[in-house]
Amino acid sequence: MKHLLLLLLGTLLSSIAAQSEYALSYEKARQAVLNAEEQLMTGGRISLSSDEAKVDDLFMQYKLGELAQGFRNAEQNAAAMHFFKAKPLIDRSAIFRFLQQMPKGAVLHLHNTASVSSKWVVQNMSYMPGMLRCTNAQGRSRLSFRKAPKEHGCSSQYVLVADERRNSIDPALYDENLERLFNLYTPVPELEYPTITAVWDKFQGMFDTLSEAIYYLPAFRAYHWQLLEELFNDNVMYAELRVGLHELYDASGRTFPKEQSVRELLQLNEKFVRLHPNFLGIKLIYAVWRGADEQKMRQNVAQFKLLQNMFPNFVVGFDLVGQEDKGKPLYEQISVLKELPPNTRLFLHAGETNWYSASTDINLLDALLLNATRIGHGFALVKHPILMNAVKTRQIAVELNPISNQVLHLVWDMRNHPGAQYMALDIPVVICNDDPGFWNAKGLSYDFYYAIMSLAPNNAGIRVLKSLAYNSLRYSALTEAEKQKAYALLEYSWGRFIDKVLQGKVF
């Protein structure tokens, strides 16, 4: 920054001293500032090979074409639109097709029970024999496979989903209505979710609707296999899942402790990796509700200790989840969090808010004081320059979830997302998808679309995309040996992808 200021000052002095040299000095100063900004931002210092440069030229033709179309016609400007309105445009975008085929590395912020496309849940899970539905006093549905289901505060008896579907006038319409129970999509989000409270109430209720059904053992296996398939098909090679574990149960009524859920995920992971050698697998971050009282939080810490001892390289960290604005701030949980083992990696949700100097955004300070490994969302970090500098200096990655922040009412026009400033300042960031199954997305490519079309500057191309892919591995919880394997695989996959583009197989 000092260098730029001196450069600009020198230009002004030169213009006064020698009017004839003013134009040349002005142009040099102007270009120097633009070059310096480009060098500073995410990916700015990456050098492209000759083949990558050719791909970059091609990519930029399509990118600038789409941006120009959006500039001329606001109704075609997907980069500035709410995802629910932009999705049909994105699905037809050449840039999106490019991103779908591009190796994206890892996704490091993904909640397991909201990770699979809602359409798959309806077309597959809801057709499993024995799914039941009830309604509580607030009119919210609960799904389960238990023969003697827990009440969950239901004001109605459980009925078989298969019977409801069979007795409906239109089974296809029934399935559409069933999907709405765990999908926030609406063509008019500004009307259906006029406030952050409205959208969060619906959002958190969807976890209550779906979670118990997912923990039915056959559904649990099928659901998480589909999770891996959707990531793999979107060219994601590794994932760290936030999991809030519950007891598994089967058709006979038997129940299994939480650690059995981890065993099941480990076995699924090992089988999937054997069948898909280019997929590195998953690891788990144990995520507990941030609003829990002290006794419950101590039980959660004890559970985490047990799981980490049993699965030391599979359960890799701890987090607190739930709406920050309404949950307990980190500061109130510090005494319990300090009971975690000294080597515990914390991947803490912090700053997922529009408030300024409230308990929610001050969670960012406590996350740093607790030596968090990564920060989930970090939306409010931009308002705290000292903390932002600390994040950059200490190389603590911010897990950006662009679509999540938009759908959950923090930002409307994605070009105003603070992730743009983080990328401009080369603050460590990774692109994540949070809960894609709950808003009609699949995989990671939709969030990458907004990252390159909205958060990155207009002239940003392959350098930024490549940097984001490598960041996802660099800031992961993989061991050093695993990272080296991951880098090698990403380099190989990236090279093959570049060749495909040059062969005309992508655009």
Image (tube, grey):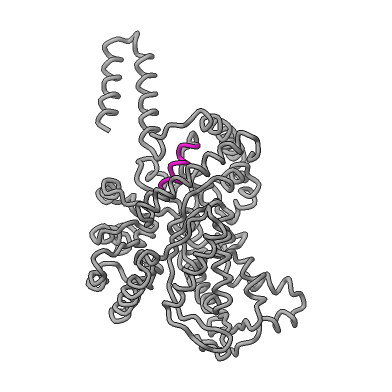
Given residues 463 and 7, the one toward you in this image is 463
Tell me residue 16's x, y (percent): 28, 14
Taking 157 as reference, is 242 above or below it?
above
95 or 387: which is nearer to us? 95
Total labels: the figure holds 0
Instruction: For the N terminus, give its image quadrant.
Output: top left
Quadrant of the drawing holding the C terminus: top right
On screen, residue 209 above or below 370: below
Classify residue 332 as left or right of residue 187.
left
**Coordinates of residue 321 in the picture (x, y in percent):** 39, 68
Residue nearest the viewer, comparing 385 with 245:
245
* Residue most extreme to the right: 169
At x 30%, y 48%, the residue is 395
Q: Residue at x 41, y 77 (%)?
A: 259
Q: Residue furthest front?
A: 274
Residue 418 seen in the figure: no
Q: Quadrant of residue 246?
A: bottom left
Q: Main secondary structure of the magenta part?
A: helix
**x 40%, y 69%: residue:** 322
**In the rendered view, would you say 387 is above or below 7?**
below
Which residue does the image show at 55% across and 29% down from the upper left? Answer: 54
Residue 363 percent location from the top left of the image = 30, 62
Q: Is residue 469 magenta?
A: yes
Q: Is residue 306 left or right of residue 450?
A: left
| Viewer-closest of 392 and 216 | 216
- The magenta span reads 462-471
55 versus 415 height, above or below:
above
Give the quarter of the image for residue 379: bottom left
Q: Is 342 covered by the magenta stretch?
A: no
